[in-house]
Image (cartoon, rainbow, N blue to C red):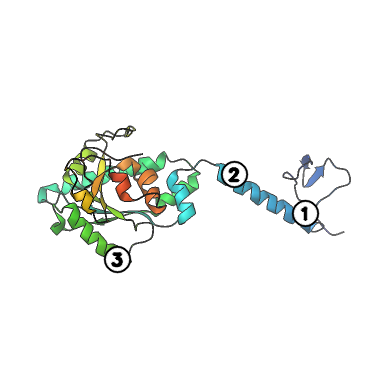
């Protein structure tokens, strides 16, 4: 007699399955379903199982950066930002810069650790997270306009992965370094409803040219083409907005005053 391999019908509606040893005993009498005798049923079960898994994936809460990676790129794609170092180039600043980078990276890791979603997906996204540091001694004290010009050339070269090609780049200034070094560990959640203050930040530099009307506005009110961005909101706020093109960079930064920090 041909040896038949039973198939468990746990997903089959209306059948209560009881597995005894190596045999499956359904409540329906005289029924033994096997992959060899009933291949159509086996295919149906496989399809049902995959559909259930897909539905479970869709219903699982996910951090915004995970959803954006899955929709626009892939979980193993390189993604992140280009960041310009425009401060801490003095010979006695080496220790300060190292401490800054360590604390900045620690803040990013806190964002990953608190991210919602399956552990394996978060781990894959963490593996792809990339910061491209642009740092040369001649960049010391560069203004936002200098950074913008350099980034325009870099972006036009086509050397950046899609996940790092944004209509803005980030800039680290002396004030940004201080905000990060002075921040407590672990970080509290800051409130941004009326413009956050005191949160650790880096500076976002808009690649777009300013409109003439922006240049003619009152100094305290006009959009300057750069604004402070919370480190806590880089992964779940800024990056998904840029990749999914939810709005222009100016729309993000126009209402942020110089001493305030943008966040979600």
Q: How many marks?
A: 3
For the N terminus, which image quadrant? bottom right
| Residue matched to label 3 | 156
User: Residue at coordinates 35% horizontally, 46% vertically from top-left?
Assistant: 238
Q: Position of residue 101 (x, y in %)?
A: 25, 47
Q: Residues within 10 Å of mark 2 (few under 14, many from 20)?
A: few
Q: Are marks 2 and 1 in contact (CB under 8 Å)?
A: no
Q: Residue furthest right?
A: 30
Numbered disc 1: secondary structure:
helix
Pick the front one: 74 or 121: 74
Q: Nearer the viewer, residue 19 or 242?
A: 242
Visible residue check, residue 75: no
Question: Counting other residues with Cα less than 10 Å from the Cα at mark 1, is it few (<14), some (14-19), or many (20 or more)?
Answer: some
Badge 3 density bin: few <14, some 14–19, many ≥20, Cα 10 Å: few
Which quadrant of the view contains residue 200? top left
SS class, disc 2: helix
Q: For the point 76% across and 43% down, which residue is it?
A: 13
Q: Which residue is mark 1?
A: 41
Residue furthest toward the left? Answer: 91
Q: Quadrant of residue 189?
A: top left
Q: Nearer the N terminus, badge 2 or badge 1?
A: 1
> Which residue does the numbered mark 2 point to in the structure image?
56
Q: Nearer the viewer, residue 166 or 246?
A: 246
Q: Could you give the CA–CA distance between mark 2 and mark 1, rounded to whole angstroms?
A: 22 Å
Circles 1, 3 touching at the beta carbon (< 8 Å): no
Circle on res. 209: none
Horizontal and vertical percent for residue 121?
A: 48, 48
């Amino acid at each position: 007699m041909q040896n038949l391999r039973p198939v468990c019908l746990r997903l089959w509606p209306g059948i209560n399955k009881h597995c005894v040893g190596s045999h499956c005993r359904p409540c329906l009498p005289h029924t033994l379903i096997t992959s060899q005798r009933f291949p159509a049923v086996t295919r149906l079960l496989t399809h049902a199982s995959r559909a259930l898994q897909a539905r479970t994936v869709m219903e699982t809460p996910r951090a915004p950066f995970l959803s954006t990676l899955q929709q626009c790129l892939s979980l193993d794609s390189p993604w992140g930002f280009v960041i310009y170092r425009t401060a801490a180039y003095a010979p006695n600043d080496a220790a300060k810069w190292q401490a800054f980078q360590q604390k900045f990276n620690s803040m990013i890791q806190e964002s990953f650790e608190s991210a919602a979603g399956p552990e394996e997906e978060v781990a894959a996204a963490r593996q792809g997270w990339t910061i491209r540091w642009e740092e040369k001694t001649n960049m010391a004290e560069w203004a936002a306009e200098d950074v913008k010009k350099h980034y325009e050339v870099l972006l036009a070269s086509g050397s950046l992965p899609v996940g790092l090609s944004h209509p803005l780049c980030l800039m680290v200034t002396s004030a940004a370094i201080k905000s990060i070094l002075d921040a407590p560990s672990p970080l509290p959640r800051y409130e941004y409803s009326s413009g956050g203050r005191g949160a650790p930040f880096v500076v976002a530099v808009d690649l777009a040219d300013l409109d003439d009307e922006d240049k003619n506005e009152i100094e305290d009110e006009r959009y300057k083409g750069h604004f402070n961005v919370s480190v806590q909101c880089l992964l779940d706020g800024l990056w998904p907005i840029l990749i999914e093109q939810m709005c222009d960079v100016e729309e993000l930064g126009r209402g942020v005053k110089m001493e305030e920090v943008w966040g979600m």
